[in-house]
Amino acid sequence: MTTQSAVVSSLEPVDGRAVIHAGDYINKLSGEQIEHECKRKLDEGCTELILNFADTEIVNSIGISILLGVIDTASNKGAKVVFSDMNETTVELFEMLGLTKHVTLA
Amino acid sequence: MAEHDHKLIHAFGALAELGQEITNKNNFQETIRTSLHLISGALGIMRGAVARFSRFGHELNMLAIRGLGDDFPLSLSLTLEDERQFLSCGLTPIDIQQAKVLPFFQVYDASFERRGLELFVPLVVRDEIVGAIFLGEKATGEAYTNYEKEIVCAMGQHIGVAIAQRNLMAEIERHADENRQLFDEMRSTYHDTVKAFAAAIDCKDKYTEGHSVRVGKFSEIIAMELGWGKDEVEGAAVAGYLHDVGKLTVERKIINAPYRINAKESKELNGHPGVGYEILQPIHHPYTDVPLAAKYHHERLDGRGYPDGLYDREIPYIAKIVTLADSFDAMTTDRPYKARRPAKEVVEDLQRNAGKQFAPELVTAFLGGMLKELQGEDRTKRFRRLLGRDYMEAEGIVDTLKYTLNEMAPTTPMTYVAAAGQVIL
Ligand SMILES: [Fe+2]
Ligand SMILES: [Fe+2]
């Protein structure tokens, strides 16, 4: 776990869709940034959260927990969550822990 | 790799991180919040909470909570039966269906059910309830397996220990507080006792009524002027209050004698420093050498004092302070065979005897304090209260003080400090 870069970038929502780019390592710090960003988009009325994991190499347990929280919050607000561009390891991890059951994969 | 192994590795990673989190000295609340994340993330659990047990309130208070909604109760009261059951189960995850027999569950059942709670883990550490963990459904929708329950158990143990540690710390802090209070009480008791003694000593000598109390206050002023700390200043005051305690054993008629006493009487009177030392020595004093102050308050820097004829550096510093305070009071109050002397004369006397009878820097400090008060720089009226307004505001006293202090400065540097604790008795 060498890198700590946790850049979260998001585009402005178009048609209720917002794209959020997760960084390379999703831990507590970067996870909370993602969470914060997602909550902000949902509050702005976003109905579809697209989390892009193209850069993501590692997700630790705290990261998983935070992502589960994002999924739960979105579903309480009736918003859809899309996970996109995951690498194989991330897909396996998310499948194993059941995250993929609650999101659309893209 | 088989999925089971994969899961295990992931969970162990979380367990290791939890261990680290707990040993880090982070904010306790934050540690618990992170712990809940780690359990949830290890097994993919949607929601849950960690609570701390309050043994005074008999309740579980939520420390961290996620995904349980705003209406989830933040505090759950327990019955003694609940507590008994927790203790008998120990730290084991209980399926919610089984936990329903617990009395407190029946009260909160609706909340628990609405939130889909599945596991309840009482946190029992060293046979004491410290808290509980509530866990909701897994994201996979599957039931908790036995190995997952074991992981919950292991992580629960870490969290339980973290809470127990925190409780212990709080307990220690509380004890420290109690100790401080107790100490303050003892200190005030000690002070009352000291003052009672001072009053008893002063009673014996009707001509010098209030002498001990005044010597205590003058000693206090000197210590303050030296810039001593609060405790040291108090110590100096106590030494002053008690310096003549040995007079309790001297015949009243000798102390009160309105004439020059004879040799035998003089011997008895001059024994009072030694007797004072004997009286004070067995008592544990929280401050400086109170007994030594009593023993040596009639010593002089030039070695012509009594009882031991010590020289300058051999005399404990605290005794030098009391000596100055004692002589100053003797000069400024009426005695059976001597009226009090005018302030101006007293100041001159102190200067003349600085280096012979008194430590010069103590004289400077003391007179400096007096000048500050007369010039309005010090508004506490310490001197005026002890000596009376008229006496303090005598004609020319400010000039005398200024002149004297000017003449005395610069005094020799302090060479006495080391002597205070190193006197050969
Ligand atoms: Fe004396
Ligand atoms: Fe005295």
Image: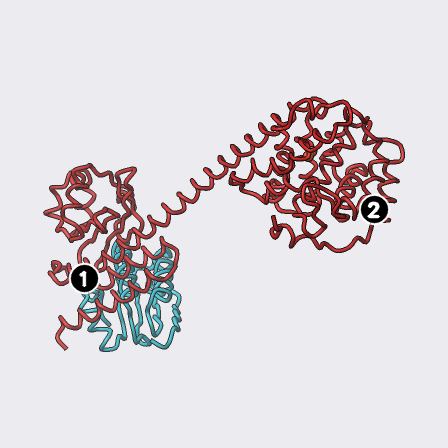
Give x and y (percent) for residue B65.
29, 51
Q: Amino acid at mark 1?
A: Ile
Give x and y (percent) for residue A39.
35, 58
Q: Is residue B412 above or below residue B255?
A: below
Q: Residue at x 57, y 32 (%)?
A: B194
Chain under disc 2 = B
Q: Secondary structure at mark 2?
A: helix
Q: Quadrant of the N terminus of chain B?
A: bottom left
Give x and y (percent) for residue B300.
74, 44
Q: Closer to the N terminus: mark 1 or mark 2?
A: 1
Instruction: Read off the residue under disc 1.
Output: B151
Co-location on one chain, circles 1 and 2:
yes
Instruction: Read off the residue under disc 2.
Output: B405
Q: Residue at x 28, y 68 (%)?
A: A60
- Of residues B78 and A62, which is closer to you in this image? B78
Give x and y (percent) for residue B242.
62, 34
Q: Colour of chain A?
A: cyan
Q: Amino acid at mark 2?
A: Leu
- Badge 1: few (under 14), some or many (20 or more) residues near its Cα, within 10 Å? many
Q: Badges 1 and 2: C-beta atoms under 8 Å apart? A: no
Q: Is residue A45 above or below residue B12?
A: above
- Of residues B381 and B188, which is closer to you in this image? B188
- Of residues B188 and B238, which is closer to you in this image? B238
Q: Quadrant of residue B235?
A: top right
Q: Quadrant of residue B415?
A: bottom right
Taking A99 as reference, is B169 left or right? right
